[in-house]
Amino acid sequence: MAGSVQMTARRREKTALGGIILAAAILASGCGGADLERPYSFEGRSLYPEAQEESRAAAFAEELCVIPDESVYQDEAVTSEAAALFSLDSRETLFSKNSFERLYPASITKVMTALVALKYGDLSDVVTVTDDAVITEQGASLCNIRPGDQLTLEQLLYGLMLPSGNDAGAAIAVHMAGSIEAFSAMMNEEALKIGATGTHFVNPHGLSDPDHYTTAYDLYLIFNEALKIPKFREVIGTTSYYAEYKSGSGETVSQTWKGGNWYMTGERQEPDGVSVFGGKTGTTNAAGYCLIMGSRDDSDNEYISVVLKADSRPGLYDNMTNLIHKIVD
Protein backbone atom coordinates (compact mmCIF):
# COMPACT_ATOMS: atom_id res chain seq x y z
CA MET A 1 0.00 0.00 0.00
CA ALA A 2 2.82 2.40 0.91
CA GLY A 3 4.54 1.65 -2.41
CA SER A 4 1.33 2.47 -4.27
CA VAL A 5 1.01 5.81 -2.46
CA GLN A 6 4.61 6.68 -3.29
CA MET A 7 4.08 5.81 -6.96
CA THR A 8 0.95 8.03 -7.06
CA ALA A 9 2.90 10.92 -5.54
CA ARG A 10 5.66 10.51 -8.11
CA ARG A 11 3.09 10.56 -10.93
CA ARG A 12 1.62 13.79 -9.58
CA GLU A 13 5.10 15.35 -9.43
CA LYS A 14 5.75 14.35 -13.05
CA THR A 15 2.38 15.77 -14.15
CA ALA A 16 3.11 19.08 -12.42
CA LEU A 17 6.56 19.20 -14.00
CA GLY A 18 5.01 18.57 -17.41
CA GLY A 19 2.70 21.56 -16.90
CA ILE A 20 5.66 23.78 -16.00
CA ILE A 21 7.57 22.63 -19.10
CA LEU A 22 4.59 23.39 -21.34
CA ALA A 23 4.13 26.86 -19.85
CA ALA A 24 7.83 27.60 -20.29
CA ALA A 25 7.71 26.43 -23.89
CA ILE A 26 4.86 28.81 -24.68
CA LEU A 27 6.60 31.77 -23.05
CA ALA A 28 9.86 30.93 -24.80
CA SER A 29 8.18 30.88 -28.19
CA GLY A 30 8.36 34.67 -28.53
CA CYS A 31 4.64 34.82 -29.31
CA GLY A 32 3.33 36.50 -26.19
CA GLY A 33 1.14 35.19 -23.38
CA ALA A 34 -1.76 32.78 -23.54
CA ASP A 35 -5.15 34.44 -23.27
CA LEU A 36 -6.74 31.59 -25.24
CA GLU A 37 -9.49 29.23 -24.19
CA ARG A 38 -7.68 25.88 -24.25
CA PRO A 39 -5.54 26.78 -27.27
CA TYR A 40 -3.93 23.34 -27.49
CA SER A 41 -6.49 20.70 -26.60
CA PHE A 42 -5.41 17.05 -26.71
CA GLU A 43 -8.47 15.63 -24.93
CA GLY A 44 -10.06 12.60 -26.48
CA ARG A 45 -7.23 11.91 -28.93
CA SER A 46 -5.90 8.39 -29.09
CA LEU A 47 -3.23 9.03 -31.73
CA TYR A 48 -0.38 9.41 -29.22
CA PRO A 49 0.43 7.08 -26.32
CA GLU A 50 -0.12 8.63 -22.89
CA ALA A 51 3.57 8.39 -22.07
CA GLN A 52 4.41 10.69 -25.00
CA GLU A 53 1.67 13.26 -24.34
CA GLU A 54 3.61 15.78 -22.26
CA SER A 55 6.64 15.96 -24.59
CA ARG A 56 4.32 16.14 -27.62
CA ALA A 57 2.39 19.07 -26.11
CA ALA A 58 5.54 21.03 -25.30
CA ALA A 59 6.96 20.58 -28.81
CA PHE A 60 3.60 21.48 -30.36
CA ALA A 61 3.44 24.76 -28.44
CA GLU A 62 7.00 25.73 -29.30
CA GLU A 63 6.27 25.74 -33.01
CA LEU A 64 3.25 28.06 -32.97
CA CYS A 65 2.31 31.66 -32.36
CA VAL A 66 0.11 32.42 -29.39
CA ILE A 67 -2.06 35.51 -29.24
CA PRO A 68 -2.01 37.61 -26.06
CA ASP A 69 -4.71 40.11 -25.12
CA GLU A 70 -5.97 41.49 -28.44
CA SER A 71 -6.29 44.98 -26.95
CA VAL A 72 -2.56 45.43 -27.59
CA TYR A 73 -3.34 45.57 -31.33
CA GLN A 74 -5.08 48.67 -32.62
CA ASP A 75 -5.47 49.66 -36.25
CA GLU A 76 -8.55 51.44 -37.57
CA ALA A 77 -7.39 50.74 -41.13
CA VAL A 78 -8.17 47.03 -40.64
CA THR A 79 -11.94 47.13 -41.00
CA SER A 80 -12.77 43.48 -41.71
CA GLU A 81 -14.56 41.46 -39.04
CA ALA A 82 -11.42 39.46 -38.25
CA ALA A 83 -7.77 39.67 -39.27
CA ALA A 84 -4.41 38.36 -38.13
CA LEU A 85 -0.74 38.32 -39.10
CA PHE A 86 1.78 35.74 -37.89
CA SER A 87 5.54 35.34 -38.38
CA LEU A 88 6.53 31.75 -39.11
CA ASP A 89 10.18 32.44 -38.30
CA SER A 90 10.03 34.43 -35.07
CA ARG A 91 6.74 32.78 -33.94
CA GLU A 92 5.44 36.28 -33.25
CA THR A 93 1.87 37.50 -33.63
CA LEU A 94 2.14 40.86 -35.39
CA PHE A 95 -1.58 41.65 -35.42
CA SER A 96 -4.82 40.12 -34.24
CA LYS A 97 -8.45 41.22 -34.42
CA ASN A 98 -11.26 38.87 -33.40
CA SER A 99 -9.01 35.91 -34.16
CA PHE A 100 -11.13 33.52 -32.08
CA GLU A 101 -14.53 34.60 -33.39
CA ARG A 102 -16.29 31.77 -35.20
CA LEU A 103 -17.02 32.84 -38.77
CA TYR A 104 -17.88 31.28 -42.11
CA PRO A 105 -14.66 30.60 -44.05
CA ALA A 106 -16.21 30.28 -47.54
CA SER A 107 -13.69 28.73 -49.96
CA ILE A 108 -10.75 29.06 -47.57
CA THR A 109 -12.23 25.73 -46.43
CA LYS A 110 -10.44 24.25 -49.43
CA VAL A 111 -7.07 24.66 -47.70
CA MET A 112 -8.16 21.89 -45.33
CA THR A 113 -9.55 19.84 -48.22
CA ALA A 114 -6.17 20.11 -49.97
CA LEU A 115 -4.31 19.29 -46.75
CA VAL A 116 -6.31 16.09 -46.19
CA ALA A 117 -5.97 15.10 -49.86
CA LEU A 118 -2.21 15.61 -49.82
CA LYS A 119 -1.63 13.83 -46.51
CA TYR A 120 -3.84 10.82 -47.08
CA GLY A 121 -4.42 10.56 -50.84
CA ASP A 122 -2.40 9.42 -53.85
CA LEU A 123 -2.06 12.19 -56.42
CA SER A 124 -1.74 9.65 -59.24
CA ASP A 125 -5.16 8.12 -58.49
CA VAL A 126 -7.64 8.38 -61.35
CA VAL A 127 -10.89 9.80 -59.99
CA THR A 128 -14.23 9.25 -61.69
CA VAL A 129 -16.47 12.24 -61.01
CA THR A 130 -19.86 11.34 -59.51
CA ASP A 131 -23.17 13.19 -59.32
CA ASP A 132 -22.06 14.61 -55.97
CA ALA A 133 -19.94 17.09 -57.95
CA VAL A 134 -23.03 18.71 -59.47
CA ILE A 135 -23.25 22.06 -57.60
CA THR A 136 -26.41 24.05 -58.34
CA GLU A 137 -26.09 26.91 -55.84
CA GLN A 138 -26.21 30.21 -57.68
CA GLY A 139 -22.85 31.96 -57.88
CA ALA A 140 -20.87 28.92 -56.71
CA SER A 141 -17.37 28.76 -58.20
CA LEU A 142 -16.69 25.70 -60.38
CA CYS A 143 -13.89 24.12 -62.39
CA ASN A 144 -16.57 22.74 -64.73
CA ILE A 145 -16.03 19.02 -64.40
CA ARG A 146 -18.94 16.67 -65.17
CA PRO A 147 -20.13 13.31 -63.83
CA GLY A 148 -18.23 10.55 -65.60
CA ASP A 149 -15.12 12.67 -66.20
CA GLN A 150 -11.88 10.99 -65.20
CA LEU A 151 -9.09 13.14 -63.75
CA THR A 152 -6.15 12.46 -61.50
CA LEU A 153 -6.32 13.56 -57.90
CA GLU A 154 -3.47 15.95 -58.69
CA GLN A 155 -5.50 17.61 -61.46
CA LEU A 156 -8.49 17.93 -59.13
CA LEU A 157 -6.26 19.60 -56.57
CA TYR A 158 -5.47 22.36 -59.06
CA GLY A 159 -9.14 22.57 -60.01
CA LEU A 160 -9.93 22.94 -56.32
CA MET A 161 -7.43 25.68 -55.52
CA LEU A 162 -7.07 27.83 -58.65
CA PRO A 163 -10.62 28.40 -59.93
CA SER A 164 -11.87 27.38 -56.45
CA GLY A 165 -13.93 24.54 -57.86
CA ASN A 166 -16.62 23.43 -55.46
CA ASP A 167 -17.23 20.53 -57.85
CA ALA A 168 -13.57 19.50 -57.51
CA GLY A 169 -13.94 19.54 -53.72
CA ALA A 170 -16.92 17.21 -53.89
CA ALA A 171 -15.13 14.87 -56.30
CA ILE A 172 -12.09 14.69 -54.01
CA ALA A 173 -14.26 14.04 -50.97
CA VAL A 174 -16.25 11.19 -52.50
CA HIS A 175 -13.13 9.58 -53.99
CA MET A 176 -11.23 9.62 -50.70
CA ALA A 177 -13.95 8.89 -48.18
CA GLY A 178 -16.98 7.61 -50.07
CA SER A 179 -19.21 10.55 -49.18
CA ILE A 180 -19.21 14.26 -48.35
CA GLU A 181 -20.09 13.46 -44.73
CA ALA A 182 -17.28 10.95 -44.26
CA PHE A 183 -14.71 13.31 -45.76
CA SER A 184 -15.95 16.15 -43.55
CA ALA A 185 -15.30 13.87 -40.57
CA MET A 186 -11.73 13.44 -41.83
CA MET A 187 -11.38 17.22 -42.06
CA ASN A 188 -12.63 17.67 -38.50
CA GLU A 189 -10.32 14.97 -37.19
CA GLU A 190 -7.36 16.65 -38.88
CA ALA A 191 -8.39 20.03 -37.45
CA LEU A 192 -8.31 18.59 -33.92
CA LYS A 193 -4.91 16.99 -34.50
CA ILE A 194 -3.37 20.39 -35.26
CA GLY A 195 -5.15 22.24 -32.45
CA ALA A 196 -7.90 23.95 -34.49
CA THR A 197 -10.52 23.44 -31.77
CA GLY A 198 -12.77 26.33 -32.87
CA THR A 199 -13.44 24.73 -36.25
CA HIS A 200 -16.17 22.47 -37.61
CA PHE A 201 -16.63 21.50 -41.26
CA VAL A 202 -19.64 19.89 -42.94
CA ASN A 203 -18.42 20.03 -46.54
CA PRO A 204 -15.14 20.19 -48.51
CA HIS A 205 -15.82 23.44 -50.38
CA GLY A 206 -17.15 26.08 -47.97
CA LEU A 207 -20.69 26.72 -49.18
CA SER A 208 -22.45 28.23 -46.18
CA ASP A 209 -23.97 26.06 -43.47
CA PRO A 210 -24.70 27.05 -39.84
CA ASP A 211 -22.51 24.16 -38.64
CA HIS A 212 -19.59 25.04 -40.92
CA TYR A 213 -17.28 27.55 -39.26
CA THR A 214 -13.74 28.33 -38.19
CA THR A 215 -11.64 31.18 -36.78
CA ALA A 216 -8.81 33.31 -38.08
CA TYR A 217 -6.46 31.62 -35.62
CA ASP A 218 -7.54 28.13 -36.66
CA LEU A 219 -7.04 29.04 -40.32
CA TYR A 220 -3.49 30.06 -39.44
CA LEU A 221 -2.97 26.62 -37.86
CA ILE A 222 -4.43 24.85 -40.92
CA PHE A 223 -2.49 26.92 -43.47
CA ASN A 224 0.70 26.55 -41.44
CA GLU A 225 0.30 22.78 -41.47
CA ALA A 226 -0.38 22.73 -45.20
CA LEU A 227 2.74 24.81 -45.91
CA LYS A 228 4.83 21.93 -44.58
CA ILE A 229 3.90 19.99 -47.73
CA PRO A 230 5.97 21.04 -50.80
CA LYS A 231 3.17 20.13 -53.22
CA PHE A 232 0.77 22.48 -51.44
CA ARG A 233 3.26 25.31 -51.87
CA GLU A 234 3.58 24.42 -55.55
CA VAL A 235 -0.18 24.47 -56.10
CA ILE A 236 -0.87 27.77 -54.30
CA GLY A 237 2.09 29.36 -56.07
CA THR A 238 0.62 28.54 -59.49
CA THR A 239 -1.39 31.17 -61.35
CA SER A 240 -2.45 29.03 -64.34
CA TYR A 241 -2.78 25.27 -64.87
CA TYR A 242 -3.60 23.30 -68.03
CA ALA A 243 -5.56 20.08 -67.45
CA GLU A 244 -6.28 17.43 -70.05
CA TYR A 245 -8.45 14.45 -69.14
CA LYS A 246 -11.14 12.06 -70.40
CA SER A 247 -14.88 12.63 -70.32
CA GLY A 248 -17.33 9.88 -69.45
CA SER A 249 -17.75 9.14 -73.16
CA GLY A 250 -13.98 8.80 -73.64
CA GLU A 251 -13.43 12.13 -75.37
CA THR A 252 -10.45 14.30 -74.48
CA VAL A 253 -11.35 17.38 -72.47
CA SER A 254 -8.96 20.26 -71.84
CA GLN A 255 -9.27 23.25 -69.55
CA THR A 256 -7.00 26.00 -68.29
CA TRP A 257 -7.67 27.02 -64.70
CA LYS A 258 -6.48 30.35 -63.33
CA GLY A 259 -6.08 31.65 -59.79
CA GLY A 260 -7.82 34.72 -58.44
CA ASN A 261 -5.40 36.22 -55.89
CA TRP A 262 -5.03 39.84 -57.00
CA TYR A 263 -1.45 40.09 -55.72
CA MET A 264 -0.43 37.14 -57.87
CA THR A 265 -2.38 38.25 -60.94
CA GLY A 266 -0.90 41.75 -60.79
CA GLU A 267 -4.16 43.52 -60.00
CA ARG A 268 -2.79 44.66 -56.64
CA GLN A 269 0.77 45.51 -55.65
CA GLU A 270 2.33 44.25 -52.44
CA PRO A 271 4.07 46.76 -50.16
CA ASP A 272 7.75 47.28 -50.93
CA GLY A 273 9.78 44.55 -49.26
CA VAL A 274 6.95 41.98 -49.26
CA SER A 275 6.23 39.27 -51.83
CA VAL A 276 3.18 37.00 -51.81
CA PHE A 277 3.93 33.36 -52.63
CA GLY A 278 0.43 31.89 -52.46
CA GLY A 279 -2.95 31.87 -50.80
CA LYS A 280 -6.67 31.13 -51.03
CA THR A 281 -9.61 33.44 -51.46
CA GLY A 282 -13.19 32.78 -50.38
CA THR A 283 -16.49 34.59 -50.91
CA THR A 284 -20.13 33.94 -50.06
CA ASN A 285 -22.93 36.24 -48.98
CA ALA A 286 -22.69 34.92 -45.43
CA ALA A 287 -18.89 34.89 -45.20
CA GLY A 288 -18.19 38.14 -47.01
CA TYR A 289 -14.82 38.46 -48.72
CA CYS A 290 -12.02 36.37 -47.23
CA LEU A 291 -8.35 35.70 -47.96
CA ILE A 292 -5.48 33.78 -46.39
CA MET A 293 -1.94 34.23 -47.74
CA GLY A 294 1.68 33.34 -47.37
CA SER A 295 4.24 36.14 -47.83
CA ARG A 296 7.98 36.71 -47.53
CA ASP A 297 10.08 39.70 -46.64
CA ASP A 298 13.41 40.53 -48.30
CA SER A 299 15.21 38.25 -45.83
CA ASP A 300 13.01 35.28 -46.84
CA ASN A 301 11.22 35.27 -43.50
CA GLU A 302 7.71 33.92 -44.01
CA TYR A 303 4.35 35.15 -42.74
CA ILE A 304 0.73 34.02 -42.74
CA SER A 305 -1.98 36.69 -42.98
CA VAL A 306 -5.75 36.22 -42.70
CA VAL A 307 -8.64 38.57 -43.48
CA LEU A 308 -12.21 37.39 -42.85
CA LYS A 309 -15.52 39.06 -43.69
CA ALA A 310 -14.44 42.17 -45.54
CA ASP A 311 -17.33 44.08 -47.11
CA SER A 312 -16.14 44.03 -50.75
CA ARG A 313 -13.41 42.60 -52.95
CA PRO A 314 -11.50 45.92 -53.16
CA GLY A 315 -12.02 46.27 -49.40
CA LEU A 316 -10.59 42.79 -48.90
CA TYR A 317 -7.34 43.77 -50.60
CA ASP A 318 -7.24 47.14 -48.85
CA ASN A 319 -7.42 45.30 -45.54
CA MET A 320 -4.82 42.75 -46.58
CA THR A 321 -2.42 45.44 -47.81
CA ASN A 322 -2.77 47.31 -44.51
CA LEU A 323 -2.11 44.04 -42.72
CA ILE A 324 1.02 42.91 -44.59
CA HIS A 325 2.40 46.46 -44.41
CA LYS A 326 3.13 45.57 -40.79
CA ILE A 327 5.78 43.13 -41.99
CA VAL A 328 8.02 46.00 -43.06
CA ASP A 329 6.74 48.89 -40.93
Image (cartoon, rainbow, N blue to C red):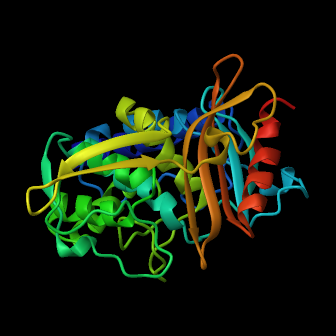
Q: Quadrant of residue 188?
A: bottom left
Residue 284 picture location, percent across and down: 57, 73
Residue 288 picture location, percent across and down: 65, 71
Q: With 124 as the anchor, is 189 left or right in this view?
A: right
Quadrant holding the C terminus? top right
| Extreme residue in the front direction | 251
Camera-side residue of 93 and 179 = 179
Number of marks in the image? 0
Residue at the spot 11% in from the left edge and 63% down from the top edge: 248
Residue at the spot 29% in from the left edge and 56% down from the top edge: 45
Residue 217 picture location, percent across and down: 59, 54
Residue at the spot 28% in from the left edge and 75% down from the top edge: 134
Q: In which quarter of the image is residue 203?
A: bottom left
Camera-side residue of 155 and 72 = 155
Q: With 63 as the anchor, is 327 left or right in this view?
A: right
Q: With 93 as the anchor, is 287 left or right in this view?
A: left
Residue at the spot 81% in from the left edge and 28% down from the top edge: 272
Residue 93 picture location, percent across and down: 71, 41
Q: Quadrant of residue 316?
A: bottom right
Res. 39 in view: no
Query: From what the image shows, is residue 310 above or below residue 275?
Result: below
Q: With 125 as the anchor, is 161 left or right in this view?
A: right
Query: From what the image shows, is residue 72 above or below residue 122?
Result: below
| Extreme residue in the top direction | 299
Query: From what the image shows, is residue 311 above or below residue 54?
Result: below
